[in-house]
Amino acid sequence: MEERSIRVEVRAAADDPNSIEGYAAVFDSLSDDLGGFREVIKPGAFKRALAESGDILCVVDHDRSKLLGRTMSGTCRVTQDDKGLFFRCAMPDTQLGRDMRALIARGDYSQCSFKFGMDPDDDEAEDWAEGTAGIVRTIRSVARLGDVSTVLTPAYRSTSVAIV
């Protein structure tokens, strides 16, 4: 699976101060250099992945041993809206959960990433082109989502962060 990072808009939900929520991807936002190319995700790109991915984790730094929530248990919800890939996670009452709430509130963890897989047989899922930004990969359809993750180093810098 591939990983892409992005600043995440994170805030404590008004009705549940133990939840975080934000955008793990923002549509039509150009990534940083990913090793000789940049990337943009088009609106609607997560439709297939959300329908076909059985369990999506919410973790720290893509580390499955640092689990915050998951869709299978109902502790994390991942959806797509007009802005991008939205998630909301009820934080666990564990040392990791308390630490992450504190680190997010301080702004130390202020960004997010997502782990995904493409369908190599889907010719319409992506295209590559050279333009003013260099080589750009345009993603139109993601086949699988593995996780949304709070991270220290994002690939995308397009959104702001807030705790309310």
Image: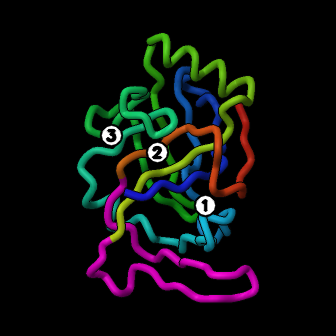
- 51 versus 125 height, above or below: above
Which amino acid, by three-letter code, is at mark 2? Val
Q: Residue 26 carries which label?
A: 1
From the image, tell me which residue sits under label 2. 148
Residue 71 disc label:
3
Q: Nearer the viewer, mark 3 or mark 2?
A: 2
Q: Farthest front residue?
A: 35
Quarter that holds the C terminus: top right
Q: Determine contact: label 2, label 1, CB under 8 Å.
A: no
Residue 2 spot, x, y in % from top left: 43, 58
Report how many numbered discs are placed on residues in the image: 3
Residue 122 image offset from top left, x and y in percent: 30, 82
User: In the rendering, at what x and y percent does residue 57 appear?
Assistant: 37, 39
Which residues lie in the magenta part? 119-145
Quick one: label 3 or label 2, which is nearer the N terminus? Answer: 3
User: Where residue 38 appears, x then y in whole percent?
Assistant: 63, 71
Q: Residue placed at 71% from the left, 55% from the top?
A: 157
Please rate how many residues cluster around mark 1, counting C-alpha atoms within 10 Å: few if below 14, some from 14 to 19, many from 20: many
Which amino acid type is shown beneath numbered disc 1?
Val
Magenta-drawn stretch contains 135: yes
Residue 164 visible in the shown view: no
- Secondary structure, mark 1, is strand
- The N terminus appears in which quarter of the rendering? bottom left
Q: Can residue 60 be seen in this view?
A: yes
Q: What residue type is labelled 3?
A: Thr
The foreground one among 82 and 146 is 146
Left or right, 70 with reference to 20 = left
User: Dividing the picture into quarters, in which one does residue 102 lie?
Assistant: top right
Determine which quarter of the picture holds residue 116: bottom left
Q: Nearer the viewer, residue 136 or 48?
A: 136
**Which residue is drawn at the image coordinates 60% and 60% (left, top)?**
26
Spatial CA span between label 3 and label 2: 11 Å
